[in-house]
Image: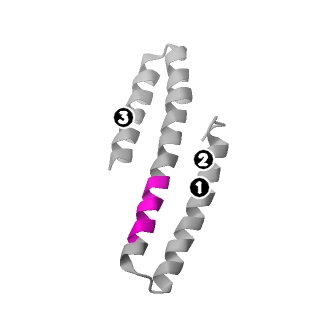
């Protein structure tokens, strides 16, 4: 991953996600109520989607922009295909 605008925000969110996952691990280890665990796993999924959005945004702003400015149609098509694949994976 090249230097990106969102790098600091992505790293901050990932650190928070690590803490959330450790918290879910503790909850399971402590035999906490299933619904409480599921609420926390939903929060983890939501936080991970936010990270994905930032990475996709960086890809669109930087990688695709570079391809467009390069004038290289093959590179433009490749970056577009990458973006479509990223969006499909993020949607799952």
Q: The N terminus is located in which quarter? A: top right
Q: Is residue 50 above or below residue 77?
A: below
Q: Which residue is mark 3?
A: 84
Q: Which residue is mark 1?
A: 14
Residue 56 horizontal/vertical position (percent): 48, 38
Measure the alpha-carbon separation of dots 2 and 1.
Answer: 6 Å
Judged left or right of residue 92, residue 83 is right
- Labelled pair 2, 1 in contact (Cβ < 8 Å): yes
Q: Residues within 10 Å of mark 2 (few under 14, many from 20)?
A: some
Q: Is residue 79 above or below residue 36?
A: above
Q: Which residue is mark 2?
A: 10
The reply to whether the magenta stretch includes residue 45 is yes
Which residue sits at x=49%, y=79%?
27
Which residue sits at x=41%, y=34%?
83
Disc marking residue 72: none
Which residue sits at x=44%, y=86%?
31
Residue 10 horizontal/vertical position (percent): 60, 47
Q: Nearer the viewer, mark 2 or mark 3?
A: 2
The reply to whether the magenta stretch includes residue 20 is no
Q: Is residue 71 above or below residue 54?
A: above
Kindly report the secondary structure that dominates the magenta region of the rendered protein: helix
What residue span does the magenta drawing correspond to?
Answer: 38-47
Measure the alpha-carbon separation of dots 1 and 3.
Answer: 23 Å
Q: Nearer the viewer, mark 1 or mark 3?
A: 1
Q: Residues within 10 Å of mark 3 (few under 14, many from 20)?
A: few
Measure the alpha-carbon separation of dots 2 and 3.
Answer: 21 Å
Q: Quadrant of residue 58?
A: top right
Element at label 3 = helix
Query: In the depicted view, which residue is nearer to us: 6 or 77?
Result: 6
């Amino acid at each position: 991953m090249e230097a990106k605008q969102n790098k600091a925000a992505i790293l901050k969110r990932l650190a928070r996600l690590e803490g959330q996952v450790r918290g879910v691990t503790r909850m399971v280890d402590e035999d906490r109520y299933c619904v409480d665990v599921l609420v926390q796993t939903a929060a983890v999924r939501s936080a991970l989607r936010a990270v994905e959005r930032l990475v996709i945004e960086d890809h669109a702003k930087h990688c695709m922009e570079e391809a467009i400015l390069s004038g290289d149609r093959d590179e433009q098509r490749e970056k577009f295909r990458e973006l479509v694949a990223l969006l499909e994976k993020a949607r799952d």
